[in-house]
C-alpha cells in the first residue's frame, strides 16, 4: 500500500516529459542517432496535445526542456579543472532553467492552438519560432535545434540550402506532430497519420531534397588548404613555461605542409599577444617563405586599451596583419555579465579578461591565391547569420578557428563540429573548422565531411574547388522563421475568442 500511495502522488506525465527530454538527445553527439529525429519528438507532442490545461502543457513543455537542455549541456561539467564543481552545477542549473522557459512557452502555445484549430502547420511553426527566439539576447543559445540532428544525413539536411536549419526543424516537427495525431484517433484510422508521416519522409527524400541543389559548376580556381591540430590540453596552455614548446610544435607541423597552400592554425594556440611576439612573427614569415604559403591563426590582440579575439594573416613578404576581430562574443566564455557575482562563485579562473566585440560587418579576407574567405572564431559558427552574410558578400570559402581544448574529452567538440558542418549545407560552400584539440574538419558544399578526430595531433590537407552560386537560403535568410512567427501570431489573434474544440 505505501508503494501505491507514492506512485499515485507522482505526476506521470511530468516524469515522462523529463525522461523524453533526456532521450531527445539521441540525434546529437555523442550518440548521433539522427534517424530517430523522425519520431523521437512525437511522444512529448502527444503529451502536450492531451494535457488537461494550457498550464499543464506549459509545465510539461518546461520539464521536457529541462531534461533536453540539461542532458545536452552536461558537457559543462568538463570545466571542473577550472572551477569548483558546485559553482559549475549552479551555472548549469541556472542556464538550463532559462532555456527551459522557452520550451514551457512552446508547450503552452501548442496546446492552446491545437485545441482551437487543427491546422497542421501550427505545431512546427510554434516549435521553430521558440527555437529561434531562444538564440536571441545576451545569453541566447541555438544549441539543440532539432534540425542539427540530421547533419549526418546530407540527403535530408540538404533542404537547409532552401531555408536553413530551421526549415529542417520545421519538417521534422511536422512529421512528429503527424505521428502524434495517431494517439488521438480511435480504431483502424489511427494508422493513417503514421502512413502520412511515412509518405512525407519519402517526399522529403525524393522530391524536396533534389530541388535543394543543382550541382553548380566550379567557378573558382582550386586552392590547397592545410589545417593544423596541435592537440595541447588547456592546462598546458595555462603554463607559460610551455608556450614556446607549443608554438614550436605548430611550426614543425606547418613545415610539413605542401607549397603554395593556405595554412590555418586554430584559435589561441597560446593565450598570449602573439602579434607582439616579433621573434615568433619573424620565424613564421620565414616558414611561409620556405613553402611559399600563407598562415591564418587566432590570437588575442590589444588595440586602444581593449582586447579582441582576432585572426591574423602571415605571408612571406607582407607585415603580419589583423584580418578579423570576433563580433559575436560568447557570454560566460569571452565576457561575463555580473562578473562580481561569478567571481564570488569561484568561476573567475575560466575567464580573466573580458574581450571587446569587433564590428559586425568586416571586410572579407582575400588570400594570396586571390580567393575570398569569410572568417569566424569558435562558437560563432553555432549561428547561421554570420556565415550567410559573408557568403552573400562573396565568400568562396568559410573558415572557423576554434579552441575546444576547454572541453576536454566531453561531447562539446562534437556538438560544435555538428553545428559548424551545417553551415556548409546552408550556403553550399566549403567550411573549414580548425581546432586546438579537435574536431578539425573540412565539410564540402554537399555536407560530406573530412576530419581529424579529437585529442590527437594531425595535419589535414586537401585541394578544394570552391563554388560560387548562392543558395536560396543565402539570398533570403531565415524566411521560415518570419513565416512561422507570422502564422503563430495571426492564429493566436484569430483564435483568441474562438471556443475550445473537443
Image (cartoon, grey):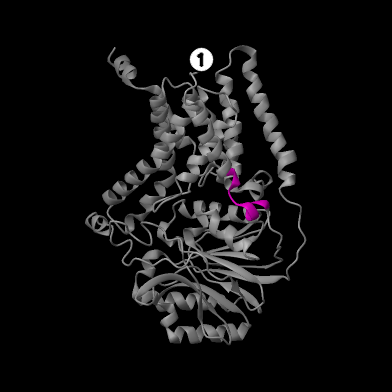
Residue extent of the magenta highlight = 472-480
Residue 280, placed above or below residue 55: below
Front one among 456 and 62: 62
The percent position of residue 442, horizontal first and vertical second, equals 61, 61
Front one among 104 and 113: 113
Helix, strand or loop status at disc 1: loop
Front one among 243 and 495: 495
5 lies left or right of 59: left
Q: Quadrant of residue 450?
A: bottom right
219 lies left or right of 33: right
* 479 within the magenta span: yes
Name the residue that disc number 1 marks.
502
Q: Main secondary structure of the magenta part?
A: helix
Which residue does the image show at 58% across and 47% down from the upper left?
165
* Image quadrant in which the N terminus is located: top left
* 451 within the magenta span: no
Q: Quadrant of residue 216?
A: bottom right
Which residue does the image show at 36% across and 73% down from the upper left?
306
Amino acid at each position: 500500500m505505501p508503494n501505491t500511495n507514492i506512485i499515485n502522488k507522482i505526476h506521470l506525465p511530468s516524469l515522462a516529459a523529463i525522461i523524453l527530454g533526456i532521450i531527445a538527445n539521441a540525434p546529437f553527439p555523442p550518440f548521433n542517432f539522427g534517424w530517430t529525429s523522425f519520431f523521437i519528438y512525437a511522444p512529448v507532442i502527444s503529451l502536450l496535445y492531451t494535457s488537461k490545461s494550457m498550464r499543464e502543457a506549459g509545465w510539461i513543455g518546461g520539464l521536457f526542456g529541462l531534461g533536453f537542455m540539461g542532458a545536452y549541456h552536461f558537457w559543462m561539467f568538463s570545466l571542473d579543472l577550472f572551477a569548483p564543481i558546485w559553482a559549475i552545477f549552479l551555472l548549469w542549473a541556472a542556464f538550463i532553467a532559462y532555456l527551459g522557459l522557452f520550451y514551457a512557452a512552446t508547450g503552452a502555445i501548442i496546446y492552446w492552438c491545437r485545441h482551437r484549430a487543427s491546422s497542421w502547420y501550427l505545431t512546427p511553426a510554434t516549435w521553430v519560432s521558440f527555437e529561434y527566439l531562444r538564440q536571441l539576447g545576451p545569453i541566447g543559445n541555438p544549441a539543440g535545434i532539432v534540425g542539427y540532428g540530421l547533419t549526418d544525413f546530407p540527403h535530408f539536411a540538404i533542404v537547409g540550402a532552401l531555408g536553413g536549419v530551421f526549415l529542417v526543424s520545421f519538417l521534422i516537427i511536422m512529421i512528429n506532430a503527424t505521428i502524434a495525431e495517431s494517439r488521438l484517433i480511435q480504431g483502424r484510422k489511427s494508422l493513417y497519420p503514421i502512413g502520412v508521416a511515412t509518405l512525407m519522409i519519402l517526399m522529403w527524400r525524393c522530391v524536396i531534397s533534389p530541388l535543394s541543389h543543382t550541382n553548380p559548376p566550379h567557378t573558382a580556381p582550386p586552392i590547397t588548404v592545410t589545417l593544423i591540430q596541435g592537440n595541447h590540453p588547456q592546462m598546458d596552455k595555462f603554463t607559460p613555461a610551455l608556450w614556446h614548446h607549443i608554438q614550436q610544435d605548430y611550426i614543425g607541423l606547418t613545415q610539413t605542409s605542401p607549397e603554395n597552400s593556405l595554412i590555418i592554425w586554430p584559435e589561441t594556440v597560446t593565450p598570449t599577444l602573439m602579434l607582439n611576439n616579433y621573434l615568433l612573427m619573424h620565424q613564421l614569415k620565414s616558414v611561409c617563405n620556405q613553402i611559399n604559403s600563407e598562415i591564418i591563426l587566432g590570437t588575442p590582440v590589444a588595440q586602444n586599451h581593449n582586447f579582441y579575439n582576432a585572426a591574423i594573416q602571415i605571408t612571406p613578404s607582407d607585415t603580419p596583419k589583423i584580418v578579423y576581430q570576433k563580433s559575436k562574443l560568447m557570454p560566460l566564455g569571452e565576457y561575463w555579465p555580473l562578473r562580481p557575482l561569478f567571481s564570488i562563485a569561484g568561476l573567475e579562473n575560466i575567464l580573466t579578461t573580458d574581450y571587446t566585440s569587433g564590428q559586425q560587418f568586416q571586410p572579407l579576407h582575400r588570400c594570396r591565391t586571390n580567393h575570398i574567405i569569410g572568417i569566424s572564431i569558435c562558437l560563432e559558427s553555432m549561428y547561421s547569420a554570420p556565415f550567410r552574410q559573408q557568403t552573400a558578400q562573396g565568400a568562396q570559402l568559410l573558415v572557423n578557428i576554434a579552441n575546444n581544448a576547454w572541453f576536454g574529452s566531453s561531447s562539446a567538440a562534437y556538438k560544435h563540429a555538428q553545428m559548424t558542418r551545417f553551415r556548409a549545407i546552408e550556403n553550399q560552400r566549403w567550411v573549414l573548422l580548425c581546432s586546438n584539440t579537435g574536431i578539425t574538419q573540412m565539410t564540402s558544399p554537399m555536407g560530406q565531411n573530412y576530419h581529424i578526430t579529437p585529442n590527437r595531433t594531425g595535419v589535414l590537407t586537401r585541394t578544394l574547388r570552391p563554388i560560387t552560386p548562392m543558395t536560396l537560403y543565402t539570398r533570403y535568410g531565415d524566411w521560415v522563421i518570419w513565416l512561422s512567427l507570422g502564422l503563430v501570431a495571426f492564429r493566436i489573434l484569430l483564435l483568441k475568442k474562438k471556443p475550445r474544440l473537443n
